[in-house]
Image (spheres, rainbow, N blue to C red):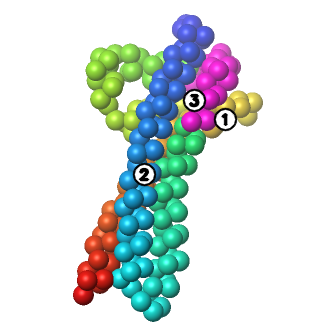
Amino acid sequence: MADVDQLARQTTTLVTGLARKGVALATGVAVVAFVVGGLSYLTGLAGLDGSARSLWSVLGLVMLVVVVGAPLLARWRLSSVIKQASALVGDLRTLLSRDAAAQRVVIDTVTVEERQPAAARELRPVIYDSRQFSRLRTATGKANDLRELPSALTAVTTFPALLGIALLGVLVFGGLGFLFLLAWIF
């Protein structure tokens, strides 16, 4: 039987380390999305006229809010995970002491991380790390008395989707910005 306190601390260390990397990545993606989306939005306003401009002013603004808001939401969720690290240890300790399946998932997650060399852990993408915790999120879904753990695992496991929304939006805004630039020039 594994030491529950040690497993809870190790898992919390993994989650908060992942959250720290994710906060930095989400901030960078939000800045890029704001710059690309904002410039495309302004180019659209300059290049369009009439009803197309009115439509773009509303639709483009909604798109910009979604594209910039997705990584900001991910950043906010992950920063709350970092702030609640001590409560997360307690929730994990409670879960691990009563659920053998959750304990097996945590052991698998922690041992996968420990077997990696330190250099490989630093170079591995944050999105890959967050996928390891999806099984643990499923295991905690049944527990109603845990306060911080479900929201922490939701923050970690939804991180890739939120960044995907932002990156897809950057591509869309980039393409539209090019078309709007052509419309503005010609």
Looking at numbered disc 1 in the image, what kind of residue is underneath it? Lys
- Residue 46 spot, x, y in % from top left: 38, 80
- How far apart marks 2 and 3 lie (CA) works out to 21 Å
Query: Which quadrant: the C terminus?
Result: bottom left
The one of 53 and 166 positioned closer to us in this rendering: 53
Q: Is residue 107 left or right of residue 120?
A: right
Which mark sits nearer the N-terminus, 3 or 1? Answer: 3
Q: Is residue 18 left or right of residue 186?
A: right
Residue displayed at 52% across by 63% down: 65
- How far apart marks 3 and 1 lie (CA) works out to 23 Å
Label 3 CA crowd tier, 10 Å (few <14, some 14–19, many 20+): many
**Label 2 belongs to which residue?**
31
Residue displayed at 39% across by 21% down: 113
Which element is circle 2 on? Answer: helix
Which mark sits nearer the N-terminus, 2 or 3? Answer: 2
Residue displayed at 37% across by 69% down: 40
Relative to 151, is 36 above or below?
Answer: below
Instruction: Examine the image and state in which quarter residue 1 appears.
Output: top right
Residue 142 has which mark? 1
- How far apart marks 1 and 2 lie (CA) works out to 37 Å
**Label 3 belongs to which residue?**
82
State the count of labels: 3
Instruction: Tell whether position 50 is magenta.
Output: no
The magenta region covers 79-102
Nearer to us: label 3 or label 1: 3
Relative to 186, is 162 above or below?
Answer: above
Residue displayed at 51% across by 16% down: 10
Q: Is residue 27 left or right of residue 1?
A: left
Relative to 77, is 46 above or below?
Answer: below
Looking at numbered disc 3 in the image, what kind of residue is underneath it? Ile
Q: Is residue 160 visible in this depiction of the protein?
A: no
